[in-house]
Amino acid sequence: MPAIADAVKQETTLVVHMLQGMGVDVVLSMGDNRKTARAIATQVGLNKVFAEVLPSHKVAKVQELHNKGKKVTMVEDDGVNDSPALAQADMGIAIGTSMDVAIEAADIVLIRNGWLDVVAGIHLSKRTIQRRYTAAWSGTDL
C-alpha cells in the first residue's frame, strides 16, 4: 500500500457512505499524485477522483461538472487555496479551520472541524429548499 501523507479521518468513510445514501455523487479532488489519490479514494469508498489538480484548476473542475449538468457542492477544510472553487460551486462549504477568505467565499460555514457536519449541512440545505418550494407551490407567503 502506498504511503499516504495525510491520514484519512476516521469518519470520512461513514460520511462518504451517508452522502451516497442521500443521492450525492461524491468526487475527490486533490493535488496529490494519482497513486496517492486513488489509494485514498479506495480507502473511503469512492470511484471518482481528480488527482494532481492545482488549486487554480479546481474552478475548471467545478465548471466541468456544471457542463455535465451536475449541481456541485465544494467543501474546503484546510485553507485559502480553494476559495475560487467554493465561490464557483452551487454550494460552498467551509469547515471552521478554513482561512478567512475561504469562509468569505463559502455559502455555509461549519464551526466545528467535523465532516459529519457536512452531511448535516447538505441535508439541511435540501430540506430548506424542499420546504421553500413546497411553500411557494402551495401559495404560502414566505
Image (cartoon, rainbow, N blue to C red):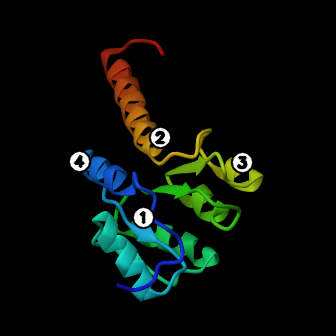
Element assignment for label 4: helix
Element assignment for label 2: helix
- Does 67 sit above or below residue 119? below
Marks 1 and 4 sit apart, C-alpha to C-alpha, by 22 Å
Which residue is disc 2 drawn over? Answer: 117
> Which amino acid, by three-letter code, is at mark 4?
Gly
Please state the horizontal and vertical placement of residue 60, each as a whole percent of the image.
53, 74
- Does 42 sit above or below residue 15? below
Which one is in front in this view, the residue at disc 4 or the one at disc 3?
A: 4
In the image: residue 20, left or right of residue 82: left
> Which amino acid, by three-letter code, is at mark 3?
Glu
Would you identify the image quadrant in which residue 64 lies?
bottom left
Which one is in front in this view, the residue at disc 3 or the one at disc 1?
A: 3
Foreground residue among 2 and 109: 2
- Of mark 2 and mark 1, the one earlier in the sequence is 1
Which residue is disc 1 drawn over? Answer: 66
- Of mark 4 and mark 3, the one earlier in the sequence is 4
Q: Is residue 126 visible?
A: yes
> Which amino acid, by three-letter code, is at mark 1?
His
Which residue is disc 3 drawn over? Answer: 104
Residue at screen point 59% across, 80% down: 54
Marks 4 and 2 sit apart, C-alpha to C-alpha, by 16 Å
In the image: residue 91, left or right of residue 140: right
Which one is in front in this view, the residue at disc 2 or the one at disc 1?
A: 2
Which residue is disc 4 drawn over? Answer: 21
> Which amino acid, by three-letter code, is at mark 2?
Asp
Classify 10 Å Cα crowding around label 2: few (below 14), some (14-19), many (20 and above).
Answer: some
